């Protein structure tokens, strides 16, 4: 990870910098608006930042999922362009999963590239039986604190995700 970087939970004072980072990283407002909506609607369970010299250079979100068991959705994950390819995203994902394991969450789902998320244990096969608008080869799951609690059933991200592509 970037030299001198620290990982911590987001605070209300970080919100403007997080929004700025998300706008720059995704080059659109969708993900920044998503995180704001997750916070406002009470579905953001955990937001973490990577900071260097007090400047936020990375962000990760874990939000409540609609599922038949306690589950989280990972994302968005964003890193400032100047700090990419330095392990910041990997450190944020590792750290956020460690935070999730402290509570009774049973699984985390992510929509992304298995080449990246697979290194953390996410597998498309673990999510394959679940009915979701995001089902497919890029929809993956990771069991937390033991075995995966179910192999099938309906599952979806928090309602704010429904508006991401509006």
Image (cartoon, rainbow, N blue to C red):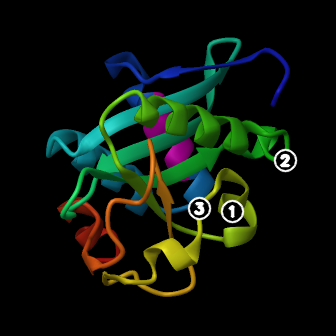
Q: Is residue 37 above or below residue 104?
A: below
Cα separation, mark 2 vs mark 3, equals: 20 Å
User: On residue 20, which mark appears?
Assistant: none
Q: Main secondary structure of the magenta part?
A: helix
Question: Depth check: 57 or 43 in front?
Answer: 43
Q: Marks 1 and 2: CB-CB under 8 Å?
A: no
Q: Marks 1 and 3: CB-CB under 8 Å?
A: yes
Cα separation, mark 1 vs mark 2, equals: 17 Å
- Circle nearer the N terminus (2, 3): 2
Residue at mark 2: 85
Which residue occupies 26% across, 58% down? 65
Q: Nearer the viewer, mark 2 or mark 3?
A: 3
> Is disc 1 surrounded by few (<14), some (14 to 19) or many (20+) residues within 10 Å?
some
> Is disc 2 surrounded by few (<14), some (14 to 19) or many (20+) residues within 10 Å?
few
> Hey, which residue is sitting farthest left in the picture?
41
> Is disc 3 surrounded by few (<14), some (14 to 19) or many (20+) residues within 10 Å?
many
Magenta stretch bounds = 17-23
Looking at the rendered structure, the secondary structure element under dot 1 is helix
User: On residue 122, which mark appears?
Assistant: 3
Q: At which x and y percent is residue 11?
A: 38, 19
Residue at mark 1: 118
Res. 139 visible in picture = no
Q: At which x and y percent is residue 150?
A: 32, 68
21 drawn magenta:
yes
38 drawn magenta:
no
Location of the C terminus (image quadrant) = bottom left
Which residue occupies 57% across, 59% down? 26
Res. 27 visible in picture = yes
Q: At which x and y percent is residue 30?
A: 39, 62
């Amino acid at each position: 990870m970037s030299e001198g970087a620290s990982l911590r939970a987001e605070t209300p004072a970080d919100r403007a910098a997080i929004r700025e980072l998300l706008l720059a990283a995704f080059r659109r407002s969708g993900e920044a608006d998503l995180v704001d909506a997750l916070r406002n609607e009470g579905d953001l369970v955990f937001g973490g930042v990577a900071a260097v010299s007090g400047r936020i250079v990375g962000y990760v979100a874990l939000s409540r999922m609609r599922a038949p068991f306690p589950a989280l959705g990972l994302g968005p994950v964003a890193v400032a362009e100047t700090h990419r390819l330095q392990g910041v995203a990997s450190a944020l994902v590792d750290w956020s999963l460690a935070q999730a394991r402290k509570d009774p969450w049973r699984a985390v789902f992510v929509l992304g590239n298995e080449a990246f998320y697979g290194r953390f244990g996410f597998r498309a096969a673990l999510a394959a039986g679940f009915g979701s608008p995001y089902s497919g080869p890029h929809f993956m799951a990771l069991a937390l604190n033991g075995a995966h609690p179910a192999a099938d059933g309906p599952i979806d991200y928090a309602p704010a995700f429904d508006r991401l592509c509006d």
